[in-house]
């Protein structure tokens, strides 16, 4: 019997999924944490608590001030849209707003590259513009950071710092048309109601003006047919389809069009990646130069089976999962049931738009024993996922082909 199988069997006998992971067998699914109450979970990050914040179901609490909440991974198997009450929450600074009048809330539009600064209330935003709807994934740059090896500092998320929602709002382009942009306009900055009482810099992000005016970057006031949950940015949040969540500024209250490149703390030195093709470097080295983080890389996950799951041998099992990328759309997902030795095509599901999660399925009839399942996606311009994990000092952009080991009995 191979060594892995032995280890698995021992682990399973001695206490379930947590112990199994403690035995060193690959990626830990966070939902395993959620369901395990044994004290045998010391390795990846120790045991995490689940707690229900306002408007939220119990989520994995990484920090409470400000709240950092992660979605338990099994939620992604429930459907392609992530429910509002399960959607992850990430903030940087401790002074987050506690109450907001959703109609009276005002967005100030100004900066040295607009001819006509003005203020827009939420009531005006909702009534005076044509709404746009986009299904798009919001993913934190540091999603999956806890799986980096060597380890890196920062919020130790597993794979649940992402979610897919149907956003309704107004294209930023239409709002900025009222501000009479000057031809000196270079970037647009975005600020929310939260503040940084302990220093470190108010959370302000910037996009190049061409990107900001692309017609898809939008001021969203609805998420999955309801108001945006408070902790996800009520009453208005910037949506930047295909781009990492760091740009999706919550409780948006100030937009400035400026004649230079903005270099506040959260644009520089924070949220930057090595300025090369892979946005990666050898562990322990320093990047020669950096650029602001941008679009998502291609990712795919099996959602219907957790690492360490038991399945029936010699019975067909339908395995389900999701793929997504930075906005080209997923063209193909391949799967392997032998640890990456051989690959076949999975079946793609419904297309909800090129920024959305895309479902895939494949059928698998396992022989008795341990099976190492892997999935790998390609987008429409041929970008895919590396077989070996890339590394970078901030722990951003993980997109390695993941492994889920299952036991058929
Ligand atoms: N106002 C404000 N907006 C913010 C942040 C923040 O700290 N303050 N964090 C950003 C980061 S890094 C992420 S990943 C997303 C997370 O969005 P969510 O909390 O709605 O899931 O919010 C972004 N918008
Ligand atoms: Mo983030």
Image: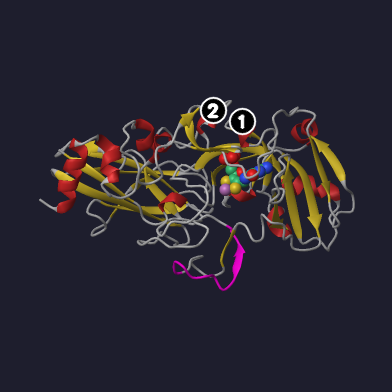
Question: CB under 8 Å between callouts 1 and 2?
Answer: yes
**Toward the viewer: 130 or 38?**
38
* Residue 294 rendering spot, x and y as whole percentages: 59, 58
Label 2 crowd bin: few (<14), some (14–19), many (20+), radius 10 Å? some
| Upstream in sequence: badge 1 or badge 2 | 2
> Residue at 61% across / 30% down in the picture?
229
- Which corner quadrant holds the C terminus? top left
- Residue interval drawn in magenta: 282-294
Asked if residue 368 lies left or right of residue 72, the reply is: left
Check residue 289 for magenta coloring.
yes
Q: Quadrant of residue 32?
A: top left
Per the image, label 2 sits on a secondary structure element best described as loop
> Residue at 39% across / 60% down in the picture?
389
Does the rendering let one see residue 238?
no
Q: Which residue is mark 1?
A: 229
**Toward the viewer: 10 or 395?**
10
* Residue 402 rendering spot, x and y as whole percentages: 35, 52
* Mark 1 within 8 Å of ligand 1, using the beta carbon: yes
Check residue 349 for magenta coloring.
no
Q: Which mark is residue 56?
A: 2
Per the image, label 1 sits on a secondary structure element best described as loop
63 is higher (above) or lower (below) than 24: above
Asked if residue 163 lies left or right of residue 385, the reply is: right
Q: Which mark is residue 46?
A: none
Between label 1 and label 2, give the one nearer the viewer. 2
| Chosen colour scheme | secondary structure
Count of all numbered marks drawn on residues in the image: 2
Does the rendering let one see residue 63?
yes
Asked if residue 344 lies left or right of residue 329, the reply is: left
């Amino acid at each position: 019997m191979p060594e892995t199988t032995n280890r698995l069997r021992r682990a399973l006998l001695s206490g379930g999924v947590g112990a199994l992971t403690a035995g060193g067998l690959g990626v830990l699914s966070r939902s395993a944490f959620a369901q395990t109450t044994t004290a045998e979970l010391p390795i990846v990050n120790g045991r995490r608590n689940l707690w229900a914040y306002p408007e939220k179901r119990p989520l994995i609490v990484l920090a409470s001030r400000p709240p950092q909440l992660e979605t338990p991974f099994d939620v992604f198997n429930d459907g392609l849209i992530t429910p509002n009450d399960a959607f992850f929450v990430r903030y940087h600074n401790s002074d987050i707003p506690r109450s907001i009048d959703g109609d009276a809330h005002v967005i100030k539009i100004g900066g040295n590259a607009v001819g006509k600064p003005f203020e827009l209330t939420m009531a005006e935003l909702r009534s005076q513009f044509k709404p746009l709807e986009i299904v798009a994934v919001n993913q934190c740059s540091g999603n999956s950071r806890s799986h980096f090896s060597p380890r890196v500092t920062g919020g130790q998320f597993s794979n649940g710092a992402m979610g897919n929602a149907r956003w309704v709002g107004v294209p930023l382009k239409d709002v900025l048309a009222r501000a009479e942009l000057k031809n000196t306009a270079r970037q647009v900055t975005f600020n929310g109601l939260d503040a940084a009482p302990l220093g470190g810099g108010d959370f302000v992000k910037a996009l190049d003006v061409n990107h900001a005016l692309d017609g898809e970057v939008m001021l969203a006031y609805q998420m999955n047919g309801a108001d945006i949950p408070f902790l996800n940015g009520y009453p208005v949040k910037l949506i930047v389809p295909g781009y990492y969540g760091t740009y999706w500024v919550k409780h948006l209250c100030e937009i400035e069009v400026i004649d230079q490149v903005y270099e506040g703390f959260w644009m520089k030195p924070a949220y930057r990646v090595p300025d090369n093709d892979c946005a990666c470097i050898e562990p322990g080295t320093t990047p020669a130069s950096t650029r602001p983080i941008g679009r998502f890389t291609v990712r795919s996950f099996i959602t219907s089976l957790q690492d360490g799951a038991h399945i029936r041998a010699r019975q067909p099992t339908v395995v389900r999962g999701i793929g997504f990328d930075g906005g080209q759309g997923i063209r193909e997902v391949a799967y392997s049931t032998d640890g990456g030795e051989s690959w076949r095509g999975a079946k793609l599901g419904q297309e909800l738009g090129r920024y959305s999660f895309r479902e895939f399925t494949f059928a698998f009839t396992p022989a008795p024993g341990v099976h190492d399942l892997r999935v790998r996606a390609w987008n429409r311009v041929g970008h895919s996922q590396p077989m070996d994990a890339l590394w970078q000092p901030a722990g951003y952009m993980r997109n390695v082909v993941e492994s889920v080991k299952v036991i058929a009995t």
